[in-house]
Amino acid sequence: MVMNMPVVGKIARIAGPVVVAKGMRGSQMFELVNVGDLNLIGEIIRLQEDLATIQVYEETSGLRPGENVVGTGRLLSVELGPGILTQIYDGIQRPLEVIKSSSGAFIARGLTAPALPREKKWNFKPKVKVGGKVVGGDILGEVSETALITHKVMVPPGVEGEVDYIAAEGEYNIEEVIARIRDPTGALHEVQMMQRWPVRKPRPYKTKLDPVQPLLTGQRIIDTFFPIVKGGTAAIPGGFGTGKTVTQHQLAQWADAKVIVYIGCGERGNEMTEMLERFPELRDPKSGRPLMERTIMIANTSNMPVAAREASVYTGVTIAEYFRDMGYDVALMADSTSRWAEALREISGRLEEMPGEEGYPPYLGARLAEFYERAGRVVTLGSEERIGSVSIIGAVSPPGGDFSEPVVQSTLRIVKVFWALDTALAYRRHFPAINWLTSYSLYLETLEDWFKKNVAPDWSELRREAMALLQKESELLEIVRLVGPDALPEADRATLEVTRMIREDYLMQHAYHPVDSYCSTEKMYLMLKTILYFNQKVKEAIAKGIPLVEILRLPVREDIARMKLVPYEKIREAAEEIKRKLDEQLESLLKGREVAVPAR
């Protein structure tokens, strides 16, 4: 809806980030408005007669009743086009680097800048010809936006017809017309390289597909025990200091996705600073190029206005859907949705709505569902079939690590993967601090065939055996607490030693180590197979009368512990060498035992 004359009202009441304006008859829900003499950016969230309730995305101190509120006739939208990659935005898509160059380290109120560079020229290569038939989602041309990502310029959704004009290959900015499409009624639609899309409206697609491919993360505990699919949803809840942010950083760095959208939603400034400093230095593991060439970051720290925090997740997921529509796999990290829910709670309180559990609005679950349901693996719009996906991984920060609080519980009713971060593991410096007994993935059965086909036929058996050992360890530790370890038989004490190896030598992973930070599925398979082979040989040796204490002195145990630090290209040789050494050393122990105890 576009209005000829902007609606101009007056501020009637101010309550923190919420402003009530009168004289706003003719406005529309979720319309962007300019508030006050400073032209602060706001969005209408309630209309009643001529009163409009507006959430303001900037600090409202100094506003006074009687100042003007001017409607723009536009919904809160994002600009989508070449130049969006490598950018660092705030919650409403203001480019922070551009604003910093003009106003310094702090964003002055009322200051804004175009989300995409207007003057920069992009080399456009047409993919259609004049006279061709196109529909919404068809690719008109391509732009090499970065060395890692080819940006596909698409027909906007809802536009179809015959190509009346297509630009020749050459340099154009995002506002120049690169195509004209004549629809069946004879009307001409001009298409630029840039589109605008309302953030609260999901972008359309043809069909949502079943999840069949894993989103590999390079993190052993995730890919082995609790995998996520491309187009899936996952939650990482955990208390302070359990490693939510570092885990999100690892996923953003190593996840098997073409494009990464990282939303720092209400995080502390020092954590976001670490992210902003680390990412430009990181290299894409496949190409060796800077990781930022396929990344968009949305930085909305805890000291920024609370309303912009609420908008930031919608901004991020709309950008993710845009790259999905090009046929790319996109991974979106939201850190953390608890801060987003707190923004909802504050705005709800300012609106004097009836509070729900712990003061959160009653619609908290519905809002979370709306966000996570925008994930999925889909057949995109367009004449030719393209498949893209958006995977959403949200961190949750429950106060005191209490998983029974409303945001965690509402999230768990929606997501399919639960990576429970454990404070006790974090205190023991076991990272990632994902508790293997309380976490789960509902995608395990779905992905079983993929892992059998692409990793190893016995992958599922190894995973089940390792998990059974970890569960057995939990039962044995209860007995140990009551009667001590010496009361256990040799076989059970051997199980405790093997599970300690699984925990320390396999599940623990060093996020900042150049080799251990990322682990391929082949390396995971060989590491786990080696540890379980050790378990099998230990049981056989104990059955033949060799004391456990002698087995634990074998030098090969150190080699198993160091497998995680072996480079990927040498891991197969290392696994075979360890197996050979283990067989030799156990054989030597057995022969020594036979010599020491001659047959009668």
Image: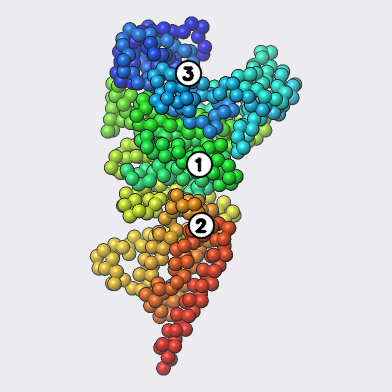
Q: Is residue 206 left or right of residue 130?
A: left
| Label 1: element kind | helix
Label 1 and label 3: CA atoms lie apart by 36 Å
Residue type beneath disc 1: Glu
Q: Can I make out residue 263 in this image?
A: yes
Q: Which residue is mark 3?
A: 75
> What label does residue 524 carry, if any?
2
Disc number lying in front (1 or 2)? 1
Tell me: 331 left or right of 303: right
* Secondary structure state at the residue bearing disc 3: strand
Whole-Å distance between the Cαs marked 1 and 2? 26 Å
Q: Residue at x 57, y 51 (%)?
A: 450
- Amino acid marked by disc 3: Leu
Q: Quadrant of residue 569?
A: bottom right
In this view, the residue in front, 161 or 508, is 508
> Callout 2, which amino acid?
Met
